[in-house]
Amino acid sequence: MTRPNCFKVGMGIVIATLTGSQKAAAQVPTLSVDPSRLPRLGTIDERFQSYNVEMVEVTGGKFWKPYVASASAPSARDAVSAGNIPASKNPDLYEYRAPIDLLNPRLRNLAAALAPAYMRVSGTSANNTYFAESDETLSTPPSGFSALLGRERWKGVIDFAHAVDAKIVTSMATSPGVRDPAGLWQSDQARRLIAYTKAVGGSIAAAEFMNEPTLAAMGGAPRGYDAAAYGRDFKAFHAFIKTSEPDLIVLGPGSVGETTASQSSIEAISTRDMLAAAGSGIDAFSYHHYGAASQRCSGIPGQTTPEAALSEEWLASTDQTRAFYQALRDEFEPGKPMWLTETADAACGGNPWASTFLDTFRYLDQLGRLARAGVQVVAHNTLASSDYGLLDEKTLRPRPNYWAALLWRRLMGTTVLDAGVHHGTHVYAHCQRVVPGAVTLLAINTDRTTAAILRLPTTSERYTLSADHLQSPGARLNGAALEFGPNDDLPHFAGVRSPPGSVELAPATITFLTIGDSGNTACG
């Protein structure tokens, strides 16, 4: 007697029949994909895969303390921004960082390999950062600010963006220092920042009014700040941008914290109320997503564990947050593109395993889910700071998530195909970035003990990410350790040729499969 095993993969619906010698392997999940029949879902921005460089990294200041503490102290020159800790936060959770060296050749080389991208320079400290009027260095920030952004530092951001093919995204200062006696937001600081950027040959591609207005009090807003105040301020910001910089993309609201226990337990302003007060006007709907608070913030509800890192519930939190904010987008700003402008494994700097292979499943599955749902930009927090950075902040050596990002950049294009929805094995499909007619499949086996079988009717090239153990600080590609070359050269990614038929997806591995002549007309 035979038993059919059915899987729906886009338009390729295949019944795999297990008989005879296959009965012993009856528990092995098997799915079949015909790349030529996968329908087109839509497209994503060419800078879909992007990253954050926190404003506090640019100015120097206190950011989330690593789990392995380091000895770092501010120089006299940088001590001006050393006290920029968000309101109501425990100072013991933070550690001083000197300004990031954006001239570092390794940092530039690794960032350029992810190009084109958006580089978002924002974060909580941006709400309270004063942009200097001249090249003169102030000894302290003016009243109403907690950090100082020198012109040479911002010029470094602009030069870095040019060097690595990144477009700058930012947000504006919104603290008491930018307000008149009546508490109304004034555009002077925003105008100065934009004017200087243009004067030195740069540009700001997109901007949010403020970082995470749902947590305005934590971000340094005036006492009693509410949805009505946000609506009033956003209208002033929007009018200023559309009058003086009409080509700049207005993002908003940049909300966070309404879909997870860790953040919904904090007093927050409702995004619905803010949108109602602000009225229409954004060019793209932005939001943030963290599935949990990290162990660093153990007093906040909503923790997670490494045991849950491959669970369907954990991975699905990306969709839950997206659906929550998409419903608000549909109600208040229908048709506007969605941008996820800040995300990582967990808030408060990431969990200890954020820097290991274990988080690579979340990272790539999140990209696949959001591209499939039509989200246009996903900016990972951060490029090179704290435990969730793509790069180690001291050595700038790639962590597993960086290698995953590089594979996505090289293999996944901007046309998204429908590969269906599965449990245990997650499959996503895109047209390749540079090869006409070619398709790339991303197959993620989240089962820690059981392999899966993927059947393809054509020859493919296989690129499998794995590690010696799930919390390894390194990753392997087709069994070989991923490392720099002799001169910090990035490795050449060579696929393993797989003939038509079955491709085994080992337990807890991530596999990209490229099909060079797929016959899919959507990729022509």
Image: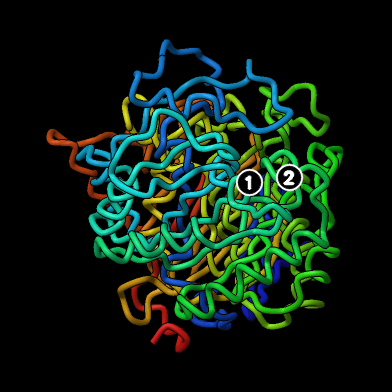
Above or below, comparing residue 518 to residue 476 in the picture:
below
Residue at image coords 45%, 73%: 414
* Residue 229 point in image, percent of width and height: 78, 59
Residue at image coords 23%, 49%: 492
SS for dot 2: loop
- Of 133 and 459, nearer the camera is 133
Residue at image coords 31%, 26%: 395
Amino acid type at circle 2 is: Pro
Quarter of the picture holding the C terminus: bottom left
Q: Is residue 282 left or right of residue 332?
A: left
- Structural crowding at the residue carrying mark 2, measured as other residues with C-alpha within 10 Å and reported as few (<14), some (14–19) or many (≥20): some
Amino acid type at circle 1 is: Ser
- Residue assigned mark 2: 222
* Residue 469 point in image, percent of width and height: 51, 26
- Of 36 and 239, nearer the camera is 239
- Residue assigned mark 1: 175
Q: Is residue 503 left or right of residue 324?
A: left
